Amino acid sequence: MKEGIHPKYDYVVFKDASADFTFRVRSTMTSKDKITWEDGKEYPLVTLDTSSKSHPFYTGKRTVSDTGGRIDKFRRRYG
């Protein structure tokens, strides 16, 4: 592989904000936020709106996830 042209590929922790579910995988994503994982090491933390623990396709349940007042913002804008 050529040096200096590939992104850093290392462990990152992803957190589903709506289901309070975290998992660690290797990724090229980065973040300024950090979290200490179960092994005692510190990893970048990427927050997700939806993962397999909260997505209706995987859970079989329909849930309402208002992650920033989108419905209220729509109602204020369009009455």
Image (spheres, rainbow, N blue to C red):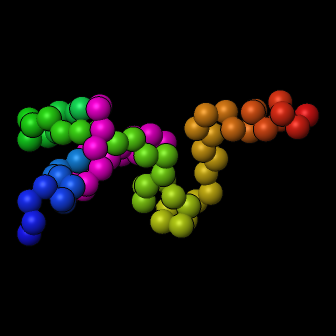
Magenta span: 13-33
Q: Compared to 51, does 44 lie above or below?
A: above
Q: Position of residue 28 (x, y in %)?
A: 25, 54
Where's the C terminus, which quadrant? top right
Q: What residue lies at 29% left-to-right and 32% top-to-bottom?
A: 32
Q: Compared to 40, does 21 lie above or below?
A: below
**Residue 62 falls inside the magenta stretch:** no
Q: What residue lies at 18% left-to-right and 59% top-to-bottom?
A: 5
Q: Where is residue 39 in the image (x, y as percent from the top left)?
A: 8, 41
- Residue 12 visible within the image: yes
Q: Where is residue 63 in the image (x, y as percent from the top left)?
A: 61, 51
In the rendered image, which quarter is residue 22 located in? top left
Q: In the visual, does 71 lie left or right of 64?
A: right
Q: What residue lies at 14% left-to-right and 35% top-to-bottom?
A: 42
Q: What residue lies at 75% left-to-right and 33% top-to-bottom?
A: 73
Q: Compared to 72, does 13 lie above or below?
A: below
